[in-house]
């Protein structure tokens, strides 16, 4: 995870065309060319060295990911339907269970793509417990 000096990991104004917000991807430019990042999307190329070593350690021994709703979807307010399946389509990079914490209900309890081990589980957390 990359965090800016002002403690943000994404840019403002997230939408379907800007999953990391406006100019949010510039924060992660060091990560994109690494072998670790490239392999998450099925490529065998990528840079090695200190950046890749650091990136690879970030995925070692990960049994699951927990994320907030904004990192999973650009949708705000009540869930309109269950058609959204995440930013990465049919091949999300996580390859372990992903738990999306939300204060709003969601009808789908799991999303299991057919060709990898990523599972998305939505957990409803009442606002008073956040």
Image (cartoon, helix red, strand yellow):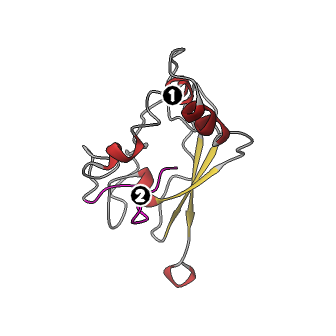
* Mark 2, secondary structure of its residue: loop
Residue at the location (39% across, 66% down)? 6
Given residues 117 and 15, the one toward you in this image is 15
Rendered location of residue 48, percent (x, y): 57, 23
| Mark 2 vs 1: CB contact within 8 A | no
**Taking 117 as reference, is 25 left or right?**
left
How far is disc 2 from disc 1 in space, using C-alphas? 20 Å
Residue 7, horizontal then vertical, whole percent: 43, 65
Residue 101 position within the rendered picture, expressed as x and y whole percent measured from the top left: 54, 63
The dot on residue 68 is none
Numbered disc 1: secondary structure: loop
Q: Earlier in the sequence, mark 2 or mark 1?
A: 2
Q: Residue at x 35, y 66 (%)?
A: 78
Task: State the image quarter where residue 80 is shown.
Answer: bottom left
Q: Position of residue 94 (x, y in %)?
A: 58, 39
- Any magenta on residue 3? yes
Dot label at residue 4: 2
Q: Which class describes the residues within 10 Å of circle 1: few (<14), some (14-19), or many (20+)?
A: many
85 up-or-down from 21: above or below: above
Residue 65: say if magenta.
Answer: no
Q: Residue at x 33, y 67 (%)?
A: 77
Q: Which residues are magenta?
A: 1-12
Counting every numbered tag in the picture gives 2
Extreme-front residue of the structure: 50
Dot 2 crowding, Cα within 10 Å, few <14, some 14–19, many 20+:
few
| Viewport quadrant of the C terminus | bottom right
Residue farthest along the top direction in this orientation: 44
- Lateral position of residue 2 relative to residue 77, left or right: right
Q: Is the residue 21 above or below the residue 55 in the image?
A: below
Q: Which mark is on residue 34? A: 1
Which SS does the magenta portion mostly show? Answer: loop
Q: Is residue 84 left or right of residue 66?
A: left
């Amino acid at each position: 995870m990359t965090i800016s000096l002002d403690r943000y990991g994404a840019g403002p104004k997230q939408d379907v065309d800007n999953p990391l917000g406006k100019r949010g991807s510039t924060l992660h430019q060091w990560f994109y060319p690494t072998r670790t990042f490239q392999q998450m999307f099925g490529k065998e190329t990528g840079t090695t060295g200190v950046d890749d070593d650091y990136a690879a350690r970030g995925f070692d021994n990960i049994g699951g990911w927990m994320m907030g709703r904004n990192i999973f979807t650009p949708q705000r307010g009540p869930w309109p339907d269950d058609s959204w399946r995440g930013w990465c389509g049919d091949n999300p990079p996580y390859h372990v269970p992903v738990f999306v914490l939300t204060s709003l209900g969601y009808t789908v309890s799991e999303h299991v793509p057919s060709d990898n081990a990523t599972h998305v589980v939505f957990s409803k957390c009442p606002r008073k417990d956040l």
